[in-house]
């Protein structure tokens, strides 16, 4: 048997999957090399994803609240935005976090190589460093954590800064007077919210009949209503037929049964129609790793590929393409390499859309239950009955729990409202602990908080909520 503690592991990619894997491997006593093109670990999430977008969304919420404050008797002058200071604040957040990861990497004696890796065979990598030198390095195990990149629609590909992807949109080079967002998913709505708060007239075009197709419709409705006020237009069942660069912007033509205005010129266009896995790693064909039809690397529950020496984690192995899924997969892969008996089998992976209101869910959705023809019981608690929501002047929210009607176990949780992203963690814990409606109902929650709405939803399940009135039939 191999002495697992003497293994030398290489991790390709320093995102939340890769750095978590590298750091845990070092903590477990393995020798570790982490390879990524950036000066420090961080990947898409820290450099051009989760973190910069959330920093900007924080500012967007603040701007929005200065307008709302009028309702509470507080008047602010219209805020002015100094884009260069906003950009440097955002960059500062990224620098602190990625610099911190660089430090943690050194403290753990992880060998960090700034460069790109290609495969020579299952255990040998060719690593090209930023300075032009190339090394051939051999390892016992290799973890692929190369992440994903924005999907491109060939007909929308114009080589002009007026057509942006999420990376260039986060650079915030300017605030266009008009912005068309193509794709009403996570990125389109989060970054659309940022640009709208900064002053752009934002239009969204979504090819499907609703925004955020993966989420239950009742969760999306309050967000849709608020976005209708914030955005210039939301065009559903619509696609972009063509784009053309003109002197003063991008001329866009729309296609679809519901189209009202077939042609319009926008200062800028943000294309956010999904992401593609980075599985085209040079030399991967020299290994036994298999890549599926949609480009995801195929792995088993230990995150091991068809090549026994190679593991893969994060966005490159499949959906949901979320940072917390990547890091948990990273932990599982490393524990498997270290010889622990593990499998990646979560009961629930939370999804959070950081718009205003936020939408968060975990486990089974009502939409999925309907598709599967599965019997469920749904209990909803409207935030209009939440004292805390009233004090925040944000009563449009809702907390719902999906139960198994027989065992009364929590099968899924969905929340829309301010702070939903924080609140969903309790739902995930409930699911991991196999909690029942009684467990949630008997858990005393602090008052007055939005977290109470989870307990209240369980009370609604039993028909015993004292905060809402349902006449007996
Ligand atoms: P990545 O973070 O993509 O990192 C992969 C790394 O590998 C990159 O640094 C890449 O340069 C490097 N790499 C690729 N090929 C090679 C090679 N050959 N050699 C060496 N290095 C290589 N998720 C959330 O959970 N919450 C959010 O709020 C959130 N917000 C997002 C906002 C935006 C705008 C975007 C774009 C994404 C967001 N995501 C969010 C998704 C999240 O960023 C990804 O799910 C996460 O980064 C995936 O982690 P990963 O480790 O798989 O790969
Ligand atoms: P997405 O899959 O969330 O949304 C893409 C949207 O574009 C979909 O609604 C789709 O129907 C639509 N679409 C596709 N082709 C279209 C076309 N031709 N015309 C009009 N609409 C079209 O993808 P995204 O917003 O690009 O984000 C990519 C991924 O990044 C997300 O799925 C998520 O995994 C991750 N992400 C997560 C967060 C978060 O956790 N808060 C934030 C941003 C990104």
Image (tube, rainbow, N blue to C red):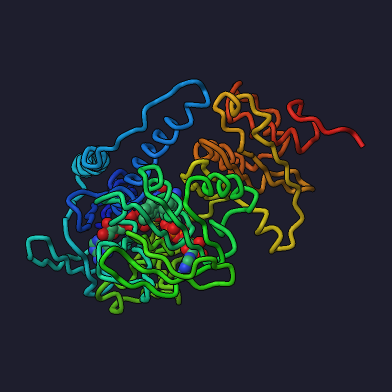
Nearest to the observer: residue 58 or residue 163: 163
Count of numbered circles in the view: 0
Please determine whether, in this image, residue 127 is positioned above or below residue 418: below
Residue located 48% across and 70% down the image: 262
Q: Quadrant of residue 256?
A: bottom right
Residue located 49% across and 47% down the image: 352
Please determine whether, in this image, residue 164 is positioned above or below residue 419: below
Point out residue 30 in the picture as x, y percentages from the top left corner: 27, 50
- On the picture, is 372 further left or further right than 318? right
Q: Is residue 91 visible?
A: yes
Residue pushed farthest bottom? 285
Residue located 40% across and 69% down the image: 252
Nearest to the observer: residue 464 or residue 306: 464
The quadrant where ligand 2 appears is bottom left
Nearest to the observer: residue 219 or residue 173: 173
Residue located 50% across and 20% down the image: 73
Instruction: Point out the image quarter for the N terminus.
Output: bottom left
Point out residue 370 in the picture as x, y percentages from the top left corner: 71, 60
Q: Quadrant of residue 401?
A: top right
Please determine whether, in this image, residue 357 is positioned above or below residue 247: above
Nearest to the observer: residue 260 or residue 49: 260
Point out residue 311 in the picture as x, y percentages from the top left corner: 36, 63
Q: Is residue 143 visible?
A: no
Instruction: Point out the image quarter for the C terminus.
Output: top right
Point out residue 75 in the picture as x, y percentages from the top left corner: 43, 24
């Amino acid at each position: 048997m191999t002495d697992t503690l003497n293994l030398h592991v290489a991790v390709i990619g320093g995102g939340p999957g890769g750095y978590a894997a590298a750091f845990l491997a070092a903590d477990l006593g393995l020798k570790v090399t982490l390879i990524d093109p950036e000066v420090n670990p961080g990947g898409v999430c820290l450099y051009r994803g989760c973190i910069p977008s959330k920093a900007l969304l924080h500012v967007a919420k603040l701007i929005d609240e200065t307008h709302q404050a009028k309702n509470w008797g507080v008047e602010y002058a219209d805020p002015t935005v100094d884009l260069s200071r906003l950009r440097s604040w955002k960059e500062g957040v990224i620098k602190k976090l990625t610099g911190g990861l660089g430090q943690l990497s050194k403290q753990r004696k992880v060998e960090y190589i700034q460069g790109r890796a290609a495969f020579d065979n299952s255990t040998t990598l060719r690593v090209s460093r930023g300075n032009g030198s190339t090394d051939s390095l051999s390892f016992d195990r290799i973890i692929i954590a190369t992440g994903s990149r924005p999907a491109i629609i060939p007909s929308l590909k114009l080589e002009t800064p007026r057509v942006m992807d999420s990376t260039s949109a986060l650079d915030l080079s300017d605030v266009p007077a008009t912005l068309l967002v193509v794709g009403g998913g996570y990125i389109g709505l989060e970054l659309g919210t940022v640009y709208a708060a900064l002053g752009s007239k934002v239009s969204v075009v979504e090819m499907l009949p609703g925004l955020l197709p993966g989420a239950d419709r009742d969760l999306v409705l309050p967000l849709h209503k608020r976005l209708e006020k914030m955005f210039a237009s939301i065009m559903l069942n619509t696609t972009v037929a063509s784009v053309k660069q003109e002197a003063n912007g991008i001329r866009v033509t729309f296609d679809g049964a519901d189209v009202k205005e077939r042609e319009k010129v926008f200062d800028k266009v943000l294309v956010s129609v999904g992401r593609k896995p980075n599985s085209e790693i040079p030399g991967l064909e020299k290994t036994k790793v298999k890549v599926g039809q949609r480009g995801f690397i195929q792995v088993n529950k230990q995150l091991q590929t068809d090549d026994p020496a190679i593991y893969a984690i994060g966005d490159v192995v499949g959906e949901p393409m979320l940072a917390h899924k990547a890091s948990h997969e990273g932990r599982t892969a490393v524990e498997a390499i270290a010889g622990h008996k593990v499998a990646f089998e979560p009961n629930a992976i939370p999804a959070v859309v950081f718009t205003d209101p936020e939408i968060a869910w975990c486990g089974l959705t009502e939409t999925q239950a309907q598709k599967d023809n599965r019997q469920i019981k749904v209990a909803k608690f409207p935030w209009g009955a939440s004292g805390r929501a009233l004090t925040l002047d944000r009563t449009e929210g809702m907390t719902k729990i999906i139960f198994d009607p027989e065992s009364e176990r929590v099968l899924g949780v969905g929340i829309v409202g301010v702070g939903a992203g924080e609140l969903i963690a309790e739902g995930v814990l409930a699911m991991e602990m196999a909690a029942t409606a009684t467990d949630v109902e008997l858990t005393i929650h602090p008052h007055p908080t939005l977290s109470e709405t989870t307990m209240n939803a369980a009370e609604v399940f039993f028909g015993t909520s004292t905060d809402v009135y349902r006449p007996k039939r």
